[in-house]
Image (spheres, helix red, strand yellow):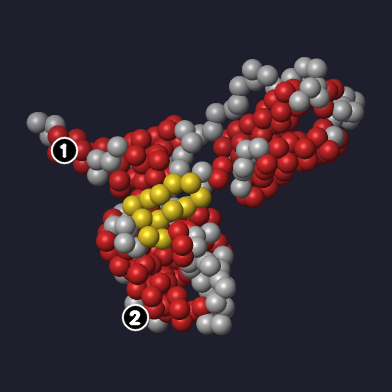
């Protein structure tokens, strides 16, 4: 049964072009389901995927709920199982698809964590001085907020992906889909300073390194490295709450939409495959609802 999982993962990588992170998530979710079938199902343990029934999947869902998995996690794991069985069915490896027409449990939608425009200004102003690392950090923070890039997309950027003359950045998103994003002038200036000054000093003897953002050893900066950098600046300026690199992506989307940006345009900039994913940013908080109400209602 593990062989079929491996075949499915190969299909997702080669045919669908899924990223390593997405592949790892599918592998983890399907292996967990396989362990459940082999360990938890004692009297009805299936010997092949063709023997798996709808009841097995329902039992798996109930098991996760009993273990108090988050609804979003349950929804993701069930979606992985459904995709896997659909693959097996299309490949002719099973006669009946037990997950066919099965509804995926709904994930509770929470408002994405954001920070105010004022806190963004404080955070982006935190890297002070002209040291190479400070120039890099200013460029990174400005670029994150200017484009809404995912952390993995930012650290994967090469120097050749930046067009300073046009003020654009090219990135490869999920499913290996390319998109070109505009960059506001202040972010472009920070990038220009870093590329022409700070990056050359960080590069040192690593002349063959193509990465845009480098660590102190002249190698490509990692996601963990970026997270630690932002965590330091968040603590330095005293922003409360759990602020991560992804918070700037959420803040970018929320601030753009509240500023009147078109939902479809924001969807394309974020690299969302479905507009329903982007629509979560259109939800308003009670405070914002009160603000709009007080400004708009003639009797307020």
Left or right: 20, with 249 as reference point: right
Query: In this view of the protein, which residue sits in the foreground, 50 or 300?
Result: 50
* Distance (Cα) linking label 2 and label 1: 42 Å
Residue found at x 40% / y 56%: 169
Q: Are marks 2 and 1 in contact (CB under 8 Å)?
A: no
Residue 129, labelled with which disc?
2
Residue found at x 68% / y 41%: 14
Query: In this view of the protein, which residue sits in the foreground, 154 or 16?
Result: 16
Residue 3, labelled with which disc?
none
Q: Is residue 171 visible?
A: yes
Residue under circle 1?
A: 294
Q: What kind of element bears circle 2?
A: loop
Give the number of the mark in front: 2 or 1: 2
Q: Is 260 above or below relative to 216? A: above
Residue found at x 35% / y 69%: 192
State which tag comes first along the sequence, 2 or 1: 2
For mark 1, does the 10 Å Cα neighbourhood hold few (<14), some (14 to 19), or many (20 or more) residues? few
Left or right: 214, with 13 as reference point: left
Q: Dividing the picture into quarters, in which one does residue 141 lie?
A: bottom left
């Amino acid at each position: 049964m593990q062989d079929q999982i491996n075949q499915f993962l190969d299909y997702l990588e080669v045919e669908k072009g899924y990223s390593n992170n997405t592949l790892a998530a599918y592998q983890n979710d399907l292996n967990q389901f396989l362990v459940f079938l082999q360990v938890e199902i004692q009297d009805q343990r299936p010997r092949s995927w063709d023997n798996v029934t709808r009841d097995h999947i329902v039992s798996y869902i109930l098991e996760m709920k009993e273990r108090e998995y988050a609804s979003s996690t349950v929804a993701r794991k069930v979606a992985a199982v459904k995709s896997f069985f659909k693959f097996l069915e299309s490949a002719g490896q099973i006669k009946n698809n037990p997950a066919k027409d099965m509804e995926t449990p709904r994930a509770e939608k929470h408002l994405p964590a954001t920070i105010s425009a004022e806190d963004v200004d404080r955070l982006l102003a935190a890297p002070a001085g002209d040291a190479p690392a400070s120039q890099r950090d200013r460029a990174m923070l400005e670029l994150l907020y200017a484009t809404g890039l995912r952390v993995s997309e930012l650290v994967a950027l090469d120097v050749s992906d930046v067009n300073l003359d046009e003020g654009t950045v090219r990135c490869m998103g999920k499913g290996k889909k390319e998109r070109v994003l505009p960059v506001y002038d202040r972010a472009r200036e920070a990038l220009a300073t870093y590329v022409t000054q700070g990056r050359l000093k960080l590069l040192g003897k690593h002349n063959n390194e193509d990465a845009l953002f480098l660590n102190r050893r002249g190698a490509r900066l990692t996601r963990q490295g970026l997270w630690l950098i932002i965590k330091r600046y968040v603590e330095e300026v005293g922003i409360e709450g759990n602020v991560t690199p992804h918070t700037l992506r959420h803040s970018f989307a929320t601030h753009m939409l509240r500023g009147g940006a078109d939902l479809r345009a924001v969807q394309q900039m974020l690299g969302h495959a479905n507009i329903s994913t982007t629509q979560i940013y259109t939800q308003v908080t009670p405070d914002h609802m009160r603000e709009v109400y007080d400004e708009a209602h003639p009797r307020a």
